[in-house]
Image (spheres, helix red, strand yellow):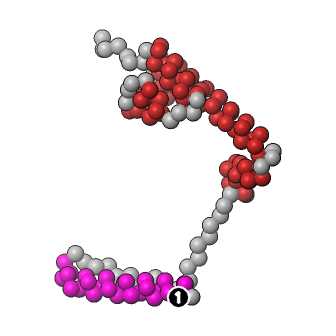
């Protein structure tokens, strides 16, 4: 038989409590006196349905959901009086409709040359110099 698990009832309670307060896994593990990798291993075993880790995973999932529910309630309450909070919230919930979209357009051609490793340093320097000049040209054209 293997060594006993480090997942004691005391650790279980502490980790679930801290996760319920919104702490990241690394901090939950640190407060329980263990490595994050051990905690992640327990959660992975839980995903595989291995007892008691599956029950631990369920407790962690519930604690996180309760934490998020509380935080969301604060955000929703603030959104009623603060337009920027409302805008932030809707941009997260419906990003495709209300999120920030950034479109980047390129005009012109892109020129490139593949430099073989066997080329001489002078030849590489010449290609690099030409590339720098071309980049400078393009940058000054977009600035004006």
Q: What is the span of residues highlighted in magenta in the rendered image? A: 118-143
Compared to residue 42, the image places residue 114 above or below, namely: below
* Quadrant housing residue 6: top left
Horizontal side of 55 relative to 39 (left or right) equals right
Residue drawn 32% across and 86% down?
Answer: 129
Count of all numbered marks drawn on residues in the image: 1
Q: Is residue 88 left or right of residue 106?
A: right
Is residue 125 shown in magenta?
Answer: yes
Side of 80 relative to 59 (left or right) = right
* Quadrant the C terminus occupies: bottom right
**Front one among 123 and 91:** 91
- Name the residue nearer the viewer: 132 or 111: 132
At which x and y percent is residue 69?
68, 33
Query: Percent x, y for residue 91?
Result: 70, 53
**Where does the image place residue 57, in percent across and percent down from the top left?**
52, 25
Q: Nearer the viewer, residue 109 or 76?
A: 76
Residue sticking out furthest to the right = 80
Horizontally, residue 84 falls left or right of residue 8, namely right
Could you tell me which secondary element the residue under label 1 belongs to?
helix
At horizontal 55% and vertical 79% (from top left) the residue drawn is 106
Q: Is residue 113 above or below residue 76?
A: below
- Name which quarter of the figure residue 100 lies in: bottom right
Q: Can I make out residue 30 in this image? A: yes
31 is higher (above) or lower (below) than 138: above
Give the farthest residue toward the top.
1
Q: What is the chief secondary structure element of the magenta stretch? A: helix
The residue that mark 1 highlights is 141
Decide: is 64 above or below 94. Answer: above
Specify few, some or many for label 1: CA neighbours under 10 Å numbering under 14, 14-19, or 20 or more. Answer: few
């Amino acid at each position: 038989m293997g060594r006993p698990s480090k997942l004691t009832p005391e650790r279980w309670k502490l980790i679930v409590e801290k996760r319920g307060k919104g702490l990241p896994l690394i901090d939950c593990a640190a407060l329980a006196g263990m490595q994050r990798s051990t905690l992640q291993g327990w959660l992975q075993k839980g995903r595989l349905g291995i007892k008691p880790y599956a029950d631990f995973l369920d407790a962690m999932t519930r604690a996180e959901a309760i934490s998020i529910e509380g935080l969301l309630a604060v955000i929703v309450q603030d959104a009623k009086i603060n337009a920027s909070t409302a805008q932030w919230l809707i941009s997260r919930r419906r990003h495709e409709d209300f999120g920030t979209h950034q479109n980047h357009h390129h005009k012109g051609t892109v020129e490139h040359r593949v430099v073989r490793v066997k080329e001489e340093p002078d030849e590489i320097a010449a290609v690099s110099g030409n590339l720098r000049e071309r980049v400078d040209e393009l940058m000054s054209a977009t600035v004006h």
